[in-house]
Image: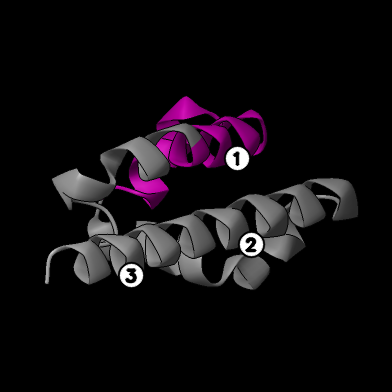
């Protein structure tokens, strides 16, 4: 649901793209594709970006944490709002 729920696409896409744009300069496009070629690794990055900290400087790590936290929060609140209005 975190990656594929169509109802949450408007909240997910801009922040996911920002996360990707933050990571790719450090990994490169080919390493991004190799490292995040499955849902499990992408979800791991979105839910706990701390494992990625050793690969980037502190400023990038903080930006990544901010983006992933914002993404999870927006998806969560949108899901709650949608479920409350569907009753």
Find out whether residue 18 is within the magenta segment.
Answer: yes
Answer with mark 3 or mark 2, whichever residue precedes in sequence: 2
- Residue 48 image offset from top left, x and y in percent: 55, 72
Structural distance between the alpha carbons of marks 2 and 1 = 9 Å
Dots 2 and 1: beta carbons under 8 Å? yes
Is residue 70 something that shows in the picture? yes
Count of numbered labels shown in the rendering: 3
Q: Is mark 1 on a helix, strand or loop?
A: helix
Structural distance between the alpha carbons of marks 3 and 1 = 29 Å
Question: What main secondary structure does the magenta stretch of the protein show?
Answer: helix
Q: Give, as a single range, the part of the protein colored magenta.
A: 15-37
55 relative position to 49: left or right: right
27 relative position to 41: left or right: right
68 relative position to 43: left or right: right
* Depicted 72 relative to depicted 60: above or below: below
* Local crowd size for mark 2, using a 10 Å CA cut-off: few (<14), some (14–19), many (≥20): some
Q: Which residue is drawn at 69% across and 59% down?
A: 65
Q: Residue at x 19, y 47 (%)?
A: 7
Q: How is the image coloured?
A: one colour
Which residue in the structure is indicated by mark 2?
Answer: 52
- Residue 64 image offset from top left, x and y in percent: 67, 51
Answer with mark 3 or mark 1, whichever residue precedes in sequence: 1
* Depicted 27 relative to depicted 41: above or below: above
Q: Is mark 3 on a helix, strand or loop?
A: helix
Q: Residue at x 40, y 50 (%)?
A: 35
Answer with mark 2 or mark 1, whichever residue precedes in sequence: 1
Q: What element carries label 2?
A: helix
Q: Residue at x 25, y 58 (%)?
A: 39
Which residue in the structure is indicated by mark 3?
Answer: 80
Which residue in the structure is indicated by mark 1?
Answer: 23
* Depicted 66 relative to depicted 87: above or below: above
Find out whether residue 51 is within the magenta segment.
Answer: no
């Amino acid at each position: 649901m975190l990656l594929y729920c169509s109802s949450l696409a408007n909240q997910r896409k801009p922040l996911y793209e920002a996360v990707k744009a933050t990571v790719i300069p450090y990994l490169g496009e080919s390493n991004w594709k190799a490292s995040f070629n499955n849902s499990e690794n992408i979800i791991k990055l979105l839910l706990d970006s701390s494992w990625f900290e050793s690969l980037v400087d502190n400023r990038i790590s903080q930006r990544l944490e901010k983006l992933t936290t914002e993404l999870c929060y927006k998806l969560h609140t949108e899901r709650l709002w949608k479920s409350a209005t569907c009753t």
